[in-house]
Image: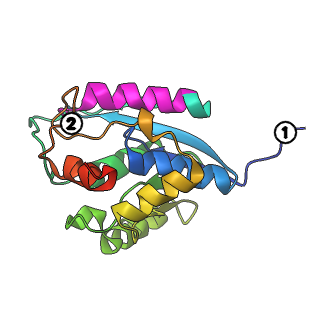
């Protein structure tokens, strides 16, 4: 007999290490996971999506894919308002009594990767849903190395992830994400 899930989470899923770690986090907590990939014209869209699909196949999850239009074109680095757009899109697509989750971590210097940002947006989620939903960012106070170590301990398939802001077949070695990975892999 199949055990009933503790709850449901709409996970903003990029196919990278952080959001993949979130899958394992919520599986360990007994949640049913709805991974949401948002296409918004990012340079790395095709390779991120490929990874997201492979990871969802690995975990036997159904990937939800949405496209958001912007009049802007994006390069690597911080994309102002990106996580805010992700969260607003998730809020617009949330199910009843569903948690929205975001795989952000400390050490980036970006406001939309901070505990203050999570707390501010959580108030919006709560007020918009009459308290039936909330935002969680389980790694907001962890650094990249701590997430990496969590992935190692939990045997998370990081080889399926994709993380380079430039969107190339190989790591550029220059963007912030690649610099993090170089440090973690020790290359």
Q: Is residue 126 left or right of residue 45?
A: right
Q: Residues within 10 Å of mark 2 (few under 14, many from 20)?
A: some
Q: Is 52 a magenta residue?
A: yes
Magenta: main secondary structure: helix
Query: Measured from the top left, where is residue 14 in percent x and y?
Result: 37, 40
Mark 1: which secondary structure?
loop
Q: Position of residue 115 (x, y in %)?
A: 35, 73
Q: Secondary structure at mark 2?
A: loop
- Give percent across and percent down for residue 95: 56, 45
Which residue in the protein does label 1 denote?
2
Q: CA distance from mark 1 to mark 2?
A: 41 Å
Q: In the drawing, does residue 114 fall left or right of residue 158?
A: left
Rendered position, 16 above or below 45: below
Give the mark nearest the N terminus, 1 or 2: 1
Which quadrant holds residue 127?
bottom left
Residue placed most toward the observer, 3 or 146: 146
Q: Which mark is residue 171?
A: 2
Range of magenta residues: 42-57
**Is residue 62 something one can see in this rendering?**
no
Instruction: Write the residue at 43% across / 33% down.
Output: 160
Q: Quadrant of residue 41?
A: top left
Badge count: 2
């Amino acid at each position: 007999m199949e055990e009933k899930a503790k709850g449901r989470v709409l996970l903003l899923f990029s196919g990278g290490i952080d959001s993949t770690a979130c899958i394992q986090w919520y599986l360990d907590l007994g949640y049913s996971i709805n991974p949401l990939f948002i296409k918004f014209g990012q340079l790395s869209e095709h390779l991120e999506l490929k990874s997201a699909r492979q990871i969802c196949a690995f975990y036997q999850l159904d990937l939800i894919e949405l496209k958001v239009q912007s009049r802007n074109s994006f390069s690597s680095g911080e994309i102002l308002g990106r996580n805010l757009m992700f969260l607003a899109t998730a809020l617009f697509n949330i199910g009843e009594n569903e948690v929205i989750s975001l795989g952000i971590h400390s050490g980036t210097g970006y406001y939309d990767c901070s505990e203050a940002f999570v707390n501010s947006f959580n108030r919006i989620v709560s007020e918009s849903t009459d308290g039936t939903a909330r935002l969680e960012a389980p790694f907001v106070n962890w650094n990249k190395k701590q997430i990496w170590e969590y992935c190692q301990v939990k045997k998370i398939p990081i080889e399926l992830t994709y993380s380079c802001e430039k969107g190339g077949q190989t790591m550029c070695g220059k963007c912030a994400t690649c610099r993090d990975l170089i440090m973690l892999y020790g290359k």
